[in-house]
Image (cartoon, rainbow, N blue to C red):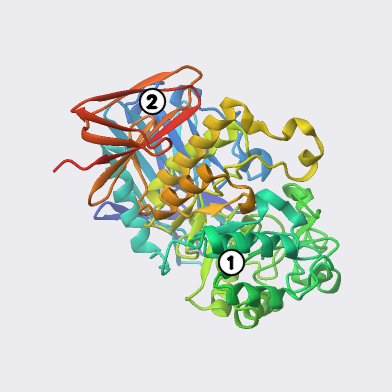
């Protein structure tokens, strides 16, 4: 990526003009020269770490470019060697000597919280570069040219300090919503998802069998999400495999006739090497330096299935028309009102050459999303998954805020941590999707062939894992998508999923170490206690009156203090009468 690097110290060619209004900072780069100048990046804020006033034990949260990435470490442990999905998986550009995050960074120690971050993302992504000595907010301009005697407006940013993290995040959200208003939807969509019980091997019979059970036992699981496996190859979304006897259009209409809503999985910005799309329209794809379609394996990785993949170019008019056609057909003919858009980050990665060379990665992605909205209309639910976070502001109704669930304790704990750091986003920036609720032991794909992966719930540790998972999903306040074979759920599972589905969709607010979350309704208060350590932990709550354990239905009455032991890697979900 060629161009000048601009910072607040720049002289001669550039002038950086900054201003502040109600806690938000605005900047523009003025080209003082007589020639057009390309800008690679702009350092809009730089601080010495010593100026911030935190010790090495302060906790630092830094957001990732896409939803799979985030970092939560002690300040003293921050280094460029930290592993992360953005760095190691997606191969995002890194600056030597710095850890690189995106969007915002938040420091917390004792009763002090400090957040620095971008409050807009219309054209440029914002990198957070930090090491033991220095912190920078850097906007990635990607070589955009500033004509002589002209200027370039940058993204806005803020610095917020307070003594309560929840309040700091609420204020941060207010700036983001002002710049990128959320797209409302009529409900928090709940449903059944095929991914974690069938994978890409889903069949028409599997769909109908689970829908029949949902009709009898779980009518609140309104959306039947067909999650990969219907298409012959990535990119060929209007074609289908031979394992479906009926056309996908007819299957979707049958789902609607049964009282449910079809929900389709689509990865709009990628296509497989084997796809008809790539074979017939290679000119619609992002190019490498030799003018050939750029393979994802050359810059990131091959892809998780049906690989290698290639990048559809959202700046190509015919590629845009293709996207519009796909979603128009699914919307108008298949009657689909809910789309899970996966692998979205490939529409916003800074690699290759697009047809329109003066368009940034963020702008290209937004062009693609605008085309999808134009085809679908705003009565549609678009769920971003594996998506770039800030570039998706104001571009989706819902957002996956965790990596993929797997039926093991460490994954469940990791996803809960990811989600709770993003609970503040729910019902503000978008509807949060914490990924699927799993309650039963199912081995998918190759695992299904090995007995060791069967009946793992007989182990008490796995029963604790499912409690942790259920409490985490409820504490998220977000979407509820069952990832199980519905006909295999027990009466106990029925009870738990029923309680989660009937609860108000308010995200819990957490204490400093994210071990205790609380939500309030008009009549009750819910407590979520998470012990992620390897030893039992005692929690003490200030509660008067009746408390109900939501897992066992055990009832206790307290006169002001309630102490309970939560075992290692376990969780507790309690509901108490609200004190008048």
10 Å crowding of disc 1: few (<14), some (14-19), many (20+): many
- Residue pictured at 74% horizontal, 63% vertical: 205
**For the C terminus, which image quadrant?**
top left
Q: In the image, is residue 114 above or below residue 330?
A: above
Q: Earlier in the sequence, mark 1 or mark 2?
A: 2
Q: Nearer the viewer, mark 1 or mark 2?
A: 1
- Residue pictured at 61% horizontal, 45% vertical: 404
Q: Which residue is mark 2?
A: 58
Element under disc 2? loop
- Residue pictured at 44% horizontal, 18% vertical: 536
Element under disc 1? strand
Which residue occupies the extreme top position in the image? 535
Q: How many marks?
A: 2
Q: Position of residue 197 (x, y in %)?
A: 68, 49
Image position of 497 (left or right of 298):
left
Which residue occupies the extreme left position in the image? 580
Image position of 137 (left or right of 349):
left
Q: Position of residue 311 (x, y in %)?
A: 72, 61
Q: Which mark is residue 347?
A: none
Q: Position of residue 241 (x, y in %)?
A: 82, 67
Q: Nearer the viewer, residue 347 or 512?
A: 512
Q: Which residue is mark 1?
A: 339
For residue 534, say whether it is visible.
yes
For residue 138, say whether it is visible.
no
Q: In the image, is residue 251 above or below residue 130?
A: below
Q: Quadrant of residue 109?
A: top left
Image position of 547 (left or right of 189):
left
Q: In the image, is residue 200 above or below residue 323?
A: above
Q: Position of residue 572 (x, y in %)?
A: 41, 32
């Amino acid at each position: 990526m060629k161009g000048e690097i601009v910072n607040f110290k720049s002289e001669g060619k550039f002038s950086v003009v900054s201003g502040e209004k109600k806690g938000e900072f605005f900047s523009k780069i003025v080209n003082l020269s007589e020639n057009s100048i390309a800008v690679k990046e702009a350092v809009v804020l730089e601080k010495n770490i010593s100026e911030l006033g935190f010790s090495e034990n302060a906790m630092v949260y830094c957001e990732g470019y896409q939803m799979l990435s985030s970092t939560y470490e002690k300040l003293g442990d921050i280094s460029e060697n930290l592993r992360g999905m953005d760095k190691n998986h997606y191969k995002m550009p890194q600056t030597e000597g710095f850890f690189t995050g995106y969007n915002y960074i938040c420091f917390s120690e004792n009763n002090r919280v400090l957040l620095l971050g971008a409050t807009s993302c219309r054209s440029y992504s914002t990198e957070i570069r930090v090491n033991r000595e220095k912190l920078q907010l850097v906007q990635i301009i990607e070589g955009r040219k500033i004509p002589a005697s002209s200027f370039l407006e940058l993204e806005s940013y803020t610095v917020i300090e307070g003594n309560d993290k929840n309040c700091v995040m609420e204020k941060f959200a207010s700036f983001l919503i002002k710049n990128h208003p959320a797209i409302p939807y009529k409900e928090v969509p709940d449903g059944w998802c095929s991914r974690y019980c069938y994978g890409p091997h889903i069949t028409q019979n599997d769909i109908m069998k689970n829908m029949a059970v949902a009709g009898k036992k779980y009518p609140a699981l309104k959306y039947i999400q067909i999650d990969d496996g219907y298409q012959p190859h990535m990119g060929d979304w209007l074609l289908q495999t031979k394992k479906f006897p009926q056309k996908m259009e007819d299957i979707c209409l049958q789902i609607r006739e049964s009282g449910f809503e079809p929900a389709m999985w689509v990865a709009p910005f990628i296509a497989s090497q084997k796809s008809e799309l790539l074979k017939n329209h290679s000119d619609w794809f992002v190019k490498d330096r030799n003018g050939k379609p750029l393979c994802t394996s050359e810059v990131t990785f091959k892809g998780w299935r049906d690989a290698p993949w290639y990048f559809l170019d959202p700046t190509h008019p015919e590629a845009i028309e293709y996207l519009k056609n796909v979603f128009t057909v699914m919307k108008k003919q298949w009657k689909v009102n809910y789309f899970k858009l996966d692998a979205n980050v490939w529409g916003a990665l800074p690699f290759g050459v697009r047809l329109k060379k003066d368009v940034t990665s963020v702008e290209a992605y937004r062009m693609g999303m605008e085309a999808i909205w134009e085809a679908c209309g705003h009565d549609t639910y678009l769920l971003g998954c594996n998506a770039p976070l800030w570039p998706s502001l104001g571009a989706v109704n819902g957002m996956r805020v965790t990596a993929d669930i797997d039926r093991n304790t460490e994954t469940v704990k990791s996803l809960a941590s990811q989600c709770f750091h993003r609970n503040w986003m729910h019902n503000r920036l978008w509807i949060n999707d914490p990924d699927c609720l799993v309650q039963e032991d199912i081995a998918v794909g190759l695992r299904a062939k090995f007995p060791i992966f069967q009946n793992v719930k007989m182990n008490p540790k796995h029963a604790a894992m499912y409690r942790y998972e259920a409490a985490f999903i409820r504490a998220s306040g977000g979407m509820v998508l069952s990832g199980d074979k519905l006909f295999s759920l027990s009466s106990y599972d029925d009870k738990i999923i029923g309680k989660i589905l009937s609860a108000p969709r308010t995200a819990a607010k957490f204490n400093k170490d994210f071990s205790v979350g609380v939500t309030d309704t008009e009549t009750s208060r819910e407590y979520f206690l998470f012990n992620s350590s390897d030893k039992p932990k005692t929690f003490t709550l200030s509660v008067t009156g009746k408390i109900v354990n939501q897992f066992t239905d055990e009832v206790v009455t307290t006169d002001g203090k309630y102490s309970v032991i939560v075992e290692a890697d376990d969780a507790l979900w309690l509901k108490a009468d609200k004190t008048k």
